[in-house]
Image (cartoon, grey):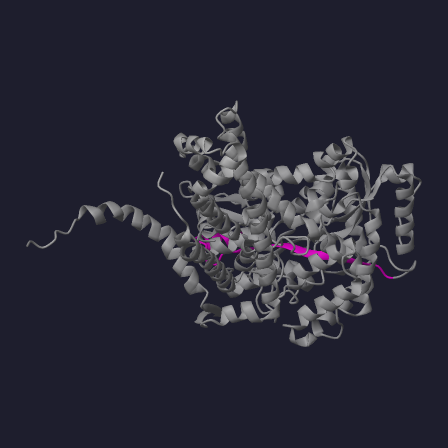
């Protein structure tokens, strides 16, 4: 028997992608984790082991901010899961209805905010909701509901929810498109077979289509999770690095930015910043692992 | 996060990748004053280049909120400009200690500045100075003269008069009494707490006592300003919680508000925007005849990147910045930024003259949180932003705010333990 040939074309074709990916993703990631194990003492970079993490979790000055950011982050995620994804799936179900007219128009209109820059979205919504120039107060006034208006972005109790809903508005196109793509792959015969068995209309969606697109919903959830725990831009654009009012909109991303780069008189601390980045990485890794090993392996797949 | 770092690094290189002409030396200036771009291009740079052929200047400002982060990244990456506009105190001290700013003590013209002016850009023992002081800003209140005339109001000097004026404006209802919001938080601390506060803690006396540990943030003179700020709430516009800094500026310059808690840096912008006559009054005192205190804050300096390829040219420029000639150009082109040099500068702008005149009547001090006290974690300045905003909104009592600030400061600052 001849020795198995080394198939050179495989490493050669993989090389460019691997090199680029390593240089811009893998290396910075590991370097960040490495940086978290050091500290700057009298202009010298000193290895301190896990001391930065100890400070982050045990020093009340740091841990209070960390837990606040993490709790806010979970709330941010929860709103996306409860509002963005169900509405996105419902929109996709409506859009995939064969008798809906102008489906392509609605689809594009709903998807457009997704391609807008955070800066534009944050700025536009700040103006819409502004108590001074915004159209939100005057629109509510026009229908006699002015009493419902509050300066939402400036109130501790509403600011984070408001921002989460703005983000939902922006990204609702993503779950919609993914679900839509999954829904149109469901063969007509299956639905027709169901119809013969007496399953029509809304129950066809619940009993036939939804089970078939569950894997897609799983992927949407994990994308939402990763996206939300890496979120930063919208909060930074709308509320600044201090994530006001009184840190009520502070999420891990803004906490990390403030620590890493510094803010106003607070000097940047790349080592503590990296420790926070490391904690974010661990949280996301944990969430993704739970999904991959505990949920996805148990999900039933149907041959279509 | 890795993407952000790379993004900023790329941005840094893009901004400073310059094509130098022939044998001319080109110096690049880093600054957060993007509002001053035209002033530099039209007045300062031509004046300097006319006197110093062979040296060209490029002014490359970035957004104020991003300046410190962007500058630090550029310095670490070796792509920062030759001249660095210096924030006061610790931000610049850290750059000097990290070897990014050169020692400028040997520049002769540094003797044009008083010790107070230089204090913001020195090592703690005063042995090295690393930035040439450029300007300070003074806090006070700017008011709409037309509105005051219409309502028959006099400029208030005591706190009681101040609130009486606010009451009158509120009753009349045509103007928002005071234009300020708490959305961005810093106005509450800077134009609120550090504007009216020095009257309570007696300026430098209180500030230095806080640094030495003799006074605490829970003492009456440090808590009382929060109680006064809480009274401001009733005079701010609807939805002030979500009102941003530009919103407040626009409300005032559109003539919709009567009083604007200000820093003198607003003068050039307000002169351009507002079409009514403006006046200024200093922070009110408790009782008529009390000594008044103003925050005359050393705000801008300029230093040299220690890694600059053209140290000689950079020093020539810095010596010129320290000269009375620069002070005159700068002070008049940017009314509201008061030159720190000992030679008195003749100011032309009436509003700026008004602010500057308080230096003769009142005791000057700088912002309480800037020197030494914002070195640790939690950062006292940033905490004060949140505290002042909370005081105005009424989400915490002044005593609670004082106690939590003191606890934070004492957690790392030995003299307060």
Q: Position of residue B93 (x, y in %)?
A: 57, 63
- Image point 54% across, 67% down: which residue? A56
* Image quadrant where residue B178 sits: top right
B104 to the left or right of B402:
left
Total numbered labels placed on residues in the image: 0
B67 to the left or right of A299:
right
Query: Depth check: B43 or B264 in front?
Result: B264
Query: Depth check: B111 or A256 in front?
Result: A256
Vertical comparison of A106 with B99: above or below: above
Q: Position of residue B375 (x, y in %)?
A: 61, 66
Q: Residue furthest top?
A: A101
A269 to the left or right of B222:
left
Magenta span contains residue B179: no
A4 to the left or right of B319:
left
Query: Depth check: B45 or B368 in front?
Result: B368
Q: Quadrant of the C terminus of chain B?
A: bottom right
Q: Which residues are magenta?
A: B291-316
* Image quadrant where residue B212 sits: bottom right
Query: Depth check: A133 or B197 in front?
Result: A133
- Image point 69% across, 39% down: which residue? A129
- Image point 82% across, 60% down: which residue? B227
Q: Is residue A43 visible?
A: no
Q: Residue furthest left?
A: A1
Q: Position of residue B257 (x, y in %)?
A: 81, 40
Q: Is residue B351 visible?
A: yes
Q: Position of residue B381 (x, y in %)?
A: 67, 61
Vertical comparison of B376 with A149: above or below: below
Vertical comparison of A145 with A9: above or below: above
């Amino acid at each position: 028997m001849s020795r198995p040939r080394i198939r050179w074309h495989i490493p050669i074709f993989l090389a460019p992608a691997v090199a680029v990916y390593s240089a811009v993703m893998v290396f910075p990631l590991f370097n960040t984790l490495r940086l978290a194990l050091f500290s700057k003492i009298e202009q010298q970079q000193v290895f301190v082991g896990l001391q930065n993490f100890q400070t982050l979790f045990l020093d009340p000055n740091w841990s209070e901010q960390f837990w606040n950011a993490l709790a806010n982050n979970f709330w941010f995620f929860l709103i996306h899961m409860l509002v963005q994804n169900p509405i996105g799936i419902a929109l996709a179900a409506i859009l995939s209805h064969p008798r809906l007219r102008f489906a392509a128009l609605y689809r594009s209109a709903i998807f457009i905010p997704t391609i807008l820059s955070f800066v534009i979205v944050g700025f536009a919504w700040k103006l819409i909701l502004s108590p001074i120039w915004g159209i939100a107060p005057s629109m509510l006034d026009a229908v006699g509901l002015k009493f419902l208006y509050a300066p939402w972005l400036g109130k501790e109790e509403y600011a984070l929810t408001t921002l989460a809903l703005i983000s939902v508005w922006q990204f609702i196109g993503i779950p919609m498109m993914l679900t839509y793509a999954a829904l149109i792959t469901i063969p007509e015969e299956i639905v027709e077979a169901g119809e013969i068995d007496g399953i029509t209309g809304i129950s066809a969606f619940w009993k036939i289509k939804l089970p078939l697109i569950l894997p897609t919903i799983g992927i949407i959830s994990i994308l939402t999770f990763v996206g939300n725990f890496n979120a930063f831009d919208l909060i930074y654009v709308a509320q600044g690095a201090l994530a006001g009012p009184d840190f009520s909109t502070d999420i891990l991303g803004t906490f990390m930015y403030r620590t890493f780069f510094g803010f106003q008189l607070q000097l940047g601390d790349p080592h503590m910043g990296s420790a926070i980045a490391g904690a974010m990485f661990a949280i996301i890794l944990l969430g993704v692992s739970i999904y991959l090993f505990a949920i996805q392996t148990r999900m039933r797949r149907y041959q279509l | 996060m890795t993407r952000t770092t790379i993004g900023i690094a790329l941005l840094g290189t893009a901004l400073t990748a310059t094509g130098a002409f022939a044998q001319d030396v080109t110096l690049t200036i880093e600054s957060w004053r993007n509002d001053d771009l035209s002033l530099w291009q039209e007045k300062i740079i031509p004046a300097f280049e006319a006197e110093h052929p062979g040296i060209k200047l490029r002014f490359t400002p970035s957004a104020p909120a991003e300046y410190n982060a962007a500058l630090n990244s550029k310095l670490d990456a070796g792509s920062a400009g030759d001249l660095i506009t210096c924030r006061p105190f610790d931000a610049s001290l850290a750059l000097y200690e990290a070897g990014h700013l050169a020692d400028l003590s040997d520049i002769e013209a540094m003797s044009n500045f008083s010790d107070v002016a230089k204090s913001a850009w020195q090592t703690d023992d005063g042995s090295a100075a690393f930035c040439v002081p450029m300007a300070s800003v003074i806090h006070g209140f700017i008011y709409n003269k037309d509105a005051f005339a219409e309502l028959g109001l006099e400029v208030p000097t005591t706190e009681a008069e101040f609130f009486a004026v606010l009451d009158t404006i509120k009753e009349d209802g045509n103007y928002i009494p005071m234009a300020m919001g708490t959305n961005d938080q810093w106005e509450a601390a800077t134009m609120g707490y550090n504007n009216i506060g020095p009257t309570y803690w007696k300026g430098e006396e209180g500030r230095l006592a806080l640094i030495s540990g003799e006074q605490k943030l829970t003492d009456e003179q440090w808590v009382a300003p929060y109680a006064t700020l809480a009274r401001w709430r009733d005079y701010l516009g609807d939805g002030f919680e979500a009102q941003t800094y530009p919103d407040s500026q626009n409300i005032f310059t559109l003539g919709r508000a009567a009083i604007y808690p200000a820093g003198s840096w607003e003068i050039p912008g307000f002169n351009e925007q507002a079409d009514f006559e403006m006046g200024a009054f200093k922070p009110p005192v408790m009782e008529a005849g009390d000594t008044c205190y103003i925050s005359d804050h050393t705000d801008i300096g300029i230093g040299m990147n220690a890694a600059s390829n053209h140290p000689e040219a950079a020093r020539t420029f810095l010596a010129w910045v320290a000269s009375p000639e620069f002070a005159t150009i700068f002070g008049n082109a940017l009314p509201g930024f008061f030159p720190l040099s000992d030679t008195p500068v003749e100011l032309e702008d009436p509003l700026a003259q008004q602010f500057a005149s308080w230096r003769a009547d009142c005791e000057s001090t700088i912002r309480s949180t800037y020197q030494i006290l914002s070195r640790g974690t939690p950062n006292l300045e940033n905490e004060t932003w949140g505290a002042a905003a909370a005081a105005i909104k009424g989400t915490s009592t002044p005593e609670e705010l004082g106690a939590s600030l003191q606890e934070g400061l004492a957690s790392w600052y030995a003299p307060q333990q």
